[in-house]
Image (cartoon, rainbow, N blue to C red):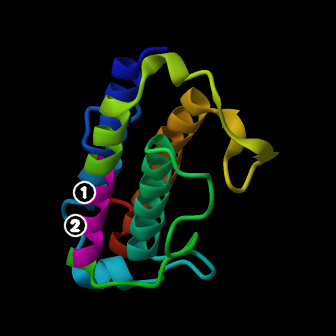
């Protein structure tokens, strides 16, 4: 798998034209402040919480590509809630940072392991390629949750 292929897949997971349906960014385009903060399903995260979580993990993967050791995102797995416009902007910045880090990353290193120990919650001990595919899948997974939350908030026509 090439850096170009990974970069394109990552872009589709956030910005659009994913084959599976709307990408994370597309799903968020019409979400209001009230909807973003709502908890329509008991025990489920809100849309704003999901967006900050996804952004945090994209930032963490960018940090790994930039040469830092793997760990949790800088403000935790589930960051403190921020205002909706700020959360949306953070998602955009995180995606842009990850794309820049990916563009600067040597393709020959894609098979190298991220960290020395396999730790599934941290996503360490796997190759950089697997990490990048994983963050793309992570975006799609949480995009699906956003779609379901929108449906719960708006009814079945959402």
**Number of numbered discs present?**
2
Q: Kindly report the secondary structure that dominates the magenta region of the rendered protein.
A: helix
**Secondary element type, mark 2:** helix
Q: Is residue 19 above or below residue 108?
A: below
At label 2, counting other C-alpha atoms closer than 10 Å, the crowd grade (few under 14, some 14-19, many 20 or more) is: some
In the rendered image, residue 35 lying in the magenta stretch gets the answer: no
Q: Position of residue 127 (x, y in %)?
A: 64, 30
Q: Where is residue 43 in the image (x, y as percent from the top left)?
A: 63, 80
Q: In this view, does 50 lie above or below 32?
A: above
Residue drawn where x is 41% and y is 69% of the image: 52
Q: In this view, does 23 lie above or below 31?
A: above
Q: Quadrant of residue 7?
A: top left
Q: In this view, does 49 lie to the left or right of 37?
A: right
Question: Which mark, residue 47?
Answer: none
Gap between marks 1 and 2 measured at Cα: 5 Å
Tell me, yes or no, if residue 18 can be seen here. Answer: no
Q: Position of residue 125 (x, y in %)?
A: 74, 39
Camera-nearest residue between 69 and 158? 69
Q: Position of residue 73 (x, y in %)?
A: 53, 65
Camera-nearest residue between 151 and 67? 67
In the rendered image, residue 87 lying in the magenta stretch gets the answer: yes
Q: Quadrant of residue 54?
A: bottom left
Q: Name the residue tied to disc 1.
A: 92
Question: Which mark, residue 89?
Answer: 2
The quadrant of the picture occupied by the C terminus is: bottom left
Q: In this view, does 37 lie above or below 7?
A: below
At label 1, counting other C-alpha atoms closer than 10 Å, the crowd grade (few under 14, some 14-19, many 20 or more) is: some
**Secondary element type, mark 1:** helix
Residues at circles 1 and 2 in contact by the CB criterion of under 8 Å:
yes
Residue drawn where x is 79% and y is 43% of the image: 118
Residue drawn where x is 45% and y is 74% of the image: 49
Extent of the magenta region: 86-95
């Amino acid at each position: 798998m090439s850096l170009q292929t990974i970069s394109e897949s990552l872009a589709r997971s956030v910005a659009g034209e994913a084959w599976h349906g709307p990408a994370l960014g597309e799903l968020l385009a019409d979400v209001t402040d009230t909807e973003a903060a709502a908890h329509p399903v008991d025990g489920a995260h809100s849309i704003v919480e999901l967006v900050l979580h996804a952004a945090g993990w994209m930032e963490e993967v960018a940090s790994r590509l930039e040469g830092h050791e793997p760990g949790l995102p800088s403000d935790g797995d589930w960051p403190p809630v921020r205002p909706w416009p700020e959360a949306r902007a953070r998602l955009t910045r995180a995606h842009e940072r990850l794309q820049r880090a990916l563009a600067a990353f040597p393709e020959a290193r894609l098979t190298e392991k991220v960290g020395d120990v396999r730790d599934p919650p941290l996503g360490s001990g796997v190759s950089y390629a697997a990490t990048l595919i994983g963050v793309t899948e992570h975006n799609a997974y949480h995009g699906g949750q956003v779609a379901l939350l929108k449906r719960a908030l708006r009814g079945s026509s959402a």
